[in-house]
Amino acid sequence: MRATRKQILGSIRGTLCLLASVSTAQGYAFNVIVPDVRQPFSVSGGSACPVRAHHPTTPGYLAFRWSTSLGTAPTTILTQDQTPSGRLNEIEQIIQQSLAVWTNVSGTALNPSWLSPLTRVSAQNACGSDGINSICFNQPDMGFTPGVLAFTRVIVADRIGIQVGTGPVATELGQILDADIYFNPGDTFVTFATPQALAANPKSYDFESLLTHELGHALGFSHSNVWSAMMFPFAPTPGTFAGARPTAQQLDAPLSDDDRTGLRVLYHDPSDSTYVGSIQGRIVPANPLSLPAAPPGVTGIFLAHVVATDSISGAVVAGSLGGWSCQSPGPAQFDGSYEIDGLAVGRSYNLYVEPLNGAAGPATVTNAFLPLCRNSTTDPGWPPLQSCVVPAPDLEFTARTLP
Amino acid sequence: MKTRLTYEQRRNFLLTLFLIGIVLIALVARATTLVRLTFPELVKDSSAIAHVRCLDSQALFENGEIWTDTSFEVLESVKGNLPAAITVRQPGGKLAGLESRVDGTPQFRGSEEAYLFLAAQPGSRLFLVGWSQGTFRLHKNPRTGIPTVTQDSAEIAAYDPQSRGFTKTGVRDLRLDIFREQIRREMLRQVP
């Protein structure tokens, strides 16, 4: 399948016409929630269509703090500078650098002015549901079992007006109210090293790669199925790092185009006129009888991986998860729809479609598809007309292109 | 000329494949928040291993965080002594208008069966060892009816820079009897 600029612009027109009421499967992939339509219209919006988890893009809105309490048995973060203040400065520099990776992508509303200055806190247990985004290196958590290196807890609002701790009150559906990043302090075999210290500590994990990935979760990303993406669900092996290091010339160098496209979709810059292309379509089986009988109403392939590549360079520009659409008041319809937005206009793209059984699988993107539906089983009292059941991902289809 | 393998030969062949898989697991350390555990490590780090059936899930607020407690009926305790019903806690959940999300935590559907590798944390709460790595879902082959297990983390492929390809590791569609035999052997091997 090939989309020219004309086709893309045509898609844009279509998108604009339907923007107010229709959403479709978009990938890269995002954390989604369904607003709680049991609540009054004024706080739920009345629609059971999934919305993406995100932060408001008000300047200075996003604040992060980090706990200077560092583990000692073992030392969780290894640095080149061993002096107490030098150590903290080295860690802080990497945190700032990792944040800058995400705030220096062209064509998004996330520019450096969106970030409040990074702050330090000495408390060991600085992470928690308090409405303050925190990064912790020495906080035990019951979630850490053997084999767990780090994780990010993201708290999302499914209605307007709620608040976590002393954080901001939700003014938007899907607003992220708290995002905390935990690094495992209790595993004697696991350490993290700053880029400066990595070569001397080849058994350590690259702190910058892991933090940049976790910050992607904190911004609302789930996982990508594009292997070169920062949000691909693999950490680099010890002693190595993912992608490239940021440079003064290219602060977002660690990201792939898939990450950048996802960010442009998630935090669209209304003044941008370059990355406004969109390709949409449906993936349907040649034989409709191959569709699952349950749940009822499935009319297309669910959770296909749709990838757009640059037709000249062949580089992957974006990958998306197809399979559903939604028109207000919902619920989601599993009709095989996909949509890849945030594409640069004036270029041609090739598309390919594959089952989600390659480099990654459904288990790595559960937050992008399991929450698409709510019903009386998951949420007592849920209105039947806005209920649905998420079908099982279709992992065994073969694809062919129709002219 | 075709040669039919005896049951013993087939079993040994499958066991060999399984052992190769274990070696492959040991070679890679991947996944966004997870470090790959070998099968012997999984068995060793688990205070209990059980064949369970999912009953229901409930979110709760404790220690300032949202957690999800999933209750399971224990169909068989393979390691450790578990009661007839257990509750496994995982970070994240949906409560009072808030959704706490943690990527990489397995989610279970009602009446689904699985083998879980469990660790007891302070307060005797049960958690999944290595999250998706300690979750082996039970399926029945629709054609043969033979039960098999697939590890949640087995979906995660490892990139091999030399071949520029991906290798899937972990336990995928392994016959249940082979899987159980492997757990038994590993437990015997680890007896002090």
Image: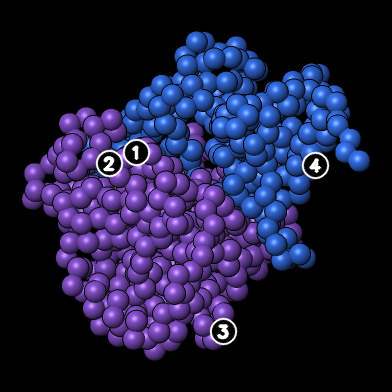
Q: Is residue B177 shown above or below A385?
A: above
The amino acid beneath tag 3 is: Ser
Quadrant in which residue A274 is drawn: bottom left
For image coordinates 17% across by 61% down, the residue present is: A21
- Name the residue carrying label 1: A295
Is there one chain holding both mark 1 and mark 2? yes
The residue where tag 2 is placed is: A388
Q: Are marks 2 and 3 on the same chain?
A: yes
Residue visible at 58% across and 63% down in the picture: A227
**What is the display colour for chain A?**
purple
- Sort mark 3 into few (<14), some (14-19) or many (20+) by Cα contacts within 10 Å: few
Tell me the CA gap for discs 1 and 2. Answer: 8 Å
Reading the chain from its start, which is encountered first: label 2 or label 3? 3
- The earlier-in-sequence mark between 1 and 3 is 1
Q: Secondary structure at mark 1?
A: loop
* Residue at the disc numbered 3: A313
Of residues A323 and A70, the one nearer the viewer is A323
Q: Nearer the viewer, mark 1 or mark 4?
A: 1
User: Do marks 4 and 3 both belong to one polypeptide chain?
Assistant: no
**Above or below — where is A341 with respect to B66?**
below
Quadrant into which the C terminus of chain B falls: top right
> Do the residues at pointers 1 and 4 share their chain?
no
* Colouring rule applied to residues: by chain
